[in-house]
Amino acid sequence: MESGVNREIRLAARPVGFPKDSDFELAETPIPEPADGEILVRNVYISVDPYMRSRMNDTKSYVPSFQIGEPMTGGAVGQVLESRHDAVSRGDWVNTMMGWREYYVADGSAVMKIDPGLAPVQKALGVLGLTGWTAYVGLLDLGRPKQGETVFVSAACGAVGSVVGQIAKLKGCRVVGSAGSAEKVAKARSEFGYDEAFNYKEETPAEALDRLCPEGIDVYFENVGGDHLAAALPRMNTFGRIALCGMVSQYNDTEVRPGPSWVPLLTNRLSVRGFIISDHFDRLPDFLRDMGAWIREGKIRDEETVVAGIENAPTAFMGLLRGENRGKMLVKVGPDAPVEA
Amino acid sequence: MESGVNREIRLAARPVGFPKDSDFELAETPIPEPADGEILVRNVYISVDPYMRSRMNDTKSYVPSFQIGEPMTGGAVGQVLESRHDAVSRGDWVNTMMGWREYYVADGSAVMKIDPGLAPVQKALGVLGLTGWTAYVGLLDLGRPKQGETVFVSAACGAVGSVVGQIAKLKGCRVVGSAGSAEKVAKARSEFGYDEAFNYKEETPAEALDRLCPEGIDVYFENVGGDHLAAALPRMNTFGRIALCGMVSQYNDTEVRPGPSWVPLLTNRLSVRGFIISDHFDRLPDFLRDMGAWIREGKIRDEETVVAGIENAPTAFMGLLRGENRGKMLVKVGPDAPVEA
């Protein structure tokens, strides 16, 4: 039995606009004890993701709001310290939504085991997890790119965008991306295979798309919203498709921001689909099969930024919202040394 | 051989905002003579439709712009006066896009014959033609209504909207519509079977939808745009579908009008499809089979407003844009008396 202290991050206040340190609280609790059928897990990596910003608000969204005074949740990979469930053993690695904390107890039948021999365990939070799966479904099922088409990806080097760009190249598309620094623009081309990329802090998306997509856009994978969306929409080709994955530039808005005119949707017969990946579980086996193969064959690269310590999770999250991450943003909250079975 | 004068309406100037009389010109030309393989047709009914407003602009759209000094075009039903094509006979009724004129010559293989025994010939411009087909494809293929769902139709009594509402009722939906007068609101319920309807000149769409769709909207068939769209979008249920057929309230805009925030598209995982019916020829046989049966069985009612005389076509068109029509707006440009074969 473990004894000691668990640390967790709680929502202290609902942010107005961009979150600040005082919206989060680091709290200590006793490490809980598993009952029959339960397991005790020590997290090693927790995920911070843009969608969490909307969960901090008290508004209707696709996932329930975080509650003030309660620990936040999110993707997490950890190792089982103690099991009172027949199907789970001490030392197993599990992937759950019990992030933002160091230790937790869960029903042993409610966790997904991961195989640490396939890839580093934290990949289950990124390219082999929600972010890669989001890229796969959003691009292939909603964007439906055809060989030779032009695909535009906002946040081209983000955890999702970097995978979208690479899959689009695998499908024979011309791929254009946006990013927020010269370094990221260079990386989009050199690491992730984008044909073209631009720095939206140096050039407006409208100017850049006129320059880089002179024949229009067939598929827009949208992570950003705001002026990216306003620029892309009237530049979509007939029968273009928009996979609406995120609008991170708008998550800290304190007022409802108008969108672009819908006239191009009609005149160019566009399709727009907002989506979240948990609606697409039917595609998980296909994703794991294809992405597993692409990674083994060296066809998909990924990148991660790791911040150490649960106490730094709010800083990591706010840095993510400012675009300071490189690829998947993770917080390492547990030790490297594995638990012996 | 016919001899005499053809009258036609030409685009005289590109409208700025709402069209005015001087944007149109009534011109006379000699009745043309058919060459080998051609036919001479006398139009009897011509169609005026909201989409024609965008063709008067010199902007990229789904159909080419009308050219200044040239006759306008659009749906028309007429009778063959003279045929030099083996497959077409004098007296045949044909449906073409050669509207806004009294007489024309066409390639005999480029016209669609209609059977005057099935229904009054002008129905081929309405419930059995483009407008009914638009309602059918937009609602069933893009809206995909399920029994018990709530369908909202803007312009509920329009040529398209009145058919959408009736098909939605045939599919077991709860149907709510908007219209621009108390008379139309009453007719939506009594004639077209809407469960609820409201007068958007008396009550904002937002207030009305809160009142009439307390459990949200599953399918929105959009003909209007503007404040209708802004009100409907945040009231769509999860996985809601928007069939974007038209935005007549915006066609006379002289500046690009912002749209509503896209946040609901993401949080509620909505689908939006802009469409025009000519992209959906594969569904024409199904439409003709189903709609023919519904009309024969008395399950679909339609309504038409007929203005007499080609010289009044611009007035009819402008009246349509102001919502003065009841159902399908037609202009009768030829005689009742049929041509003898």
Image (cartoon, coloured by chain):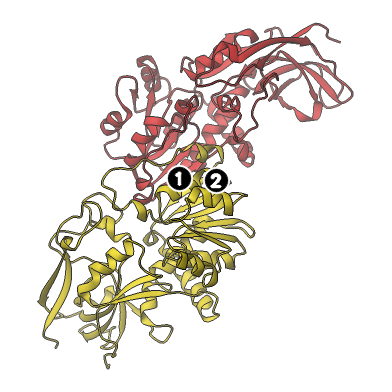
Chain colours: A red, B yellow
Badge number at residue B235: 2
Can you give x and y, in whole percent of width and height, for residue B273 in the image? 45, 50
Q: How many labels sit on residues?
A: 2
Vertical placement of B69 versus A226: above or below?
below
Please name the amino acid that badge 1 sits on: Ala
Tell which of A29 and B94 is nearer to you: A29
Please name the amino acid that badge 2 sits on: Arg
Residue at far front of view: B202
Residue at far bottom of view: B340
Can you give x and y, in whole percent of width and height, for residue B137 in the image? 47, 62
- Look at the numbered disc 2 and give the secondary structure of its residue: helix
Q: Residue at x 56, y 41 (%)?
A: B268
Vertical placement of B58 versus B288: above or below?
above
Q: Residue at x 55, y 41 (%)?
A: B269
The answer, for residue A303, to whether it is visible in the render is: no
Q: Which image quarter holds the C terminus of chain A?
A: top right
- Looking at the image, residue A95 sits to the left or right of residue B24; the answer is right
- At label 2, counting other C-alpha atoms closer than 10 Å, the crowd grade (few under 14, some 14-19, many 20 or more) is many
* Gap in angstroms between the C-alphas marked 2 and 1: 9 Å
Vertical placement of A330 versus B185: above or below?
above
The answer, for residue B54, to whether it is visible in the render is: yes
- Looking at the image, residue A142 sits to the left or right of residue A98; the answer is left
Subunit under mark 2 = B
- Looking at the image, residue A106 sits to the left or right of residue A124; the answer is right
- Indicate the quadrant where residue B85 lies: bottom left
Subunit under mark 1 = B
User: Which numbered disc flags the more N-terminal residue, 2 or 1?
Assistant: 1
Badge number at residue B87: none
Tell which of A77 and A10 is nearer to you: A10
Badge number at residue B230: 1
Whether discs 2 and 1 lie on one chain: the answer is: yes
- Look at the numbered disc 1 and give the secondary structure of its residue: helix
